[in-house]
Image (tube, rainbow, N blue to C red):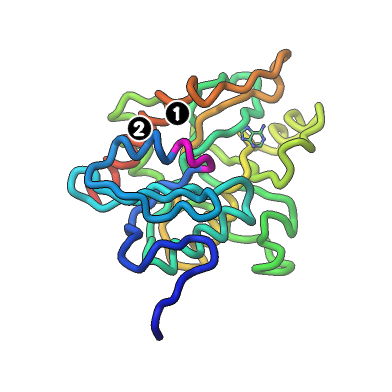
Amino acid sequence: MSFRELPHIKARPGDIAKNVIAVGDPGRVDLLSQLLEEKRVVNEHRGLKVVTGTYKGVKVSIATHGIGCPSAMIVFEELGILGARRFVRVGTTGGLRRDIRVGDVVVATGAGYTQGGCGLGQYMPGICGATSPHSVLTARIMESLSRNGVKFLAGPVYSSDAFYAEDPSFAERMSHLGFVAVEMEAAGLFALGWMRGWETAAVLVVSDVLPSEEKVFLTTAELADKFTSVARAVLDVFSEL
Ligand code: ADE
């Protein structure tokens, strides 16, 4: 079958690496692709910027997945069609516990979601998806974070479908259920990973803490250094595999 083009990611076969760092914001593709050499932009369609380059000689793509599972899962599916096999989401998250601080790093060991939500109700009606990351990849990333001097908390996150629907009782309810932080894409990524045979993981920087008295969001500039340290640790894992 000849390849024409995909609807959202207009890269060609060969343009996408097996190893992908996926981020929500195309600005972060620009930030993190500074860590790559021999880089080129392989997609800008729909603002879903993707850059492919090398890190320590290993081919890597840094891709924008947009906001929420429906957007992210379209991007993951199309990157998978184009050859991606290992996906690490490096994103922001909202802390759900009072002991979490902005700038902290959370490694997701699982992701809950609302029954039928996260796009998964359509992939697997009536089934609660296998929303855990790849354990070996996640363990390697935790080791690499430690080696790179990045402290982290490991625990389950909740993948929300509605950023602005988080009422004042949300954090207390969700932390009571065991979730450490809230974000919007990990459950979709993890479930797709098991469905498609990919390795997946998510490393998240806390941009806001929901139960704090005065809710503050760290700015993109304030998050930049932490994102870069996390991405370097992930890229080191890619270069060692
Ligand atoms: N990502 C970062 N902060 C978040 C929040 N409060 N809710 C959902 N996703 C987030």
Q: Position of residue 155 (x, y in %)?
A: 54, 37
Q: Is residue 25 magenta?
A: yes
Magenta-drawn stretch, dominant element (helix, strand or loop)? helix
Which residue is located at x 53 percent, y 61 percent?
8
Q: Where is residue 65 in the image (x, y as percent from the top left)?
A: 52, 50
Q: Position of residue 226 (x, y in %)?
A: 42, 25
Q: What residue type is labelled 2?
A: Leu
Picture quarter with the N terminus: bottom left
Which residue is located at x 56 percent, y 19 percent?
101
Which residue is most to the left? Answer: 57
Which residue is located at x 41 percent, y 77 percent?
3
Q: How crowded is mark 1: few (under 14 residues within 10 Å), some or many (20 or more)?
A: some
Q: Name the residue under label 2.
A: 145
Q: Is mark 1 within 8 Å of ligand 1?
A: no
- Residue 196 appearing in the image: yes
Mark closest to the chain's N terminus, 1 or 2 = 2
Q: Position of residue 129 (x, y in %)?
A: 62, 61
Magenta residues? 24-28
Mark 2 and mark 1 in contact (Cβ < 8 Å)? yes
Image quarter of residue 214: top right
Secondary structure under the numbered disc 2 in the rendered image:
helix
How far apart marks 1 and 2 lie (CA) works out to: 8 Å
Q: Which amino acid does label 1 sit on?
A: Phe
Q: Name the residue under label 1.
A: 152
Using the image as rendered, state which of residue 155 and residue 214 is in the foreground. Answer: 214
Quadrant of the rendered image holding ligand 1: top right
Residue 88 placement, left or right of 238: right
Q: Is residue 156 magenta?
A: no
Check the image and report above or below for 129 versus 111.
below
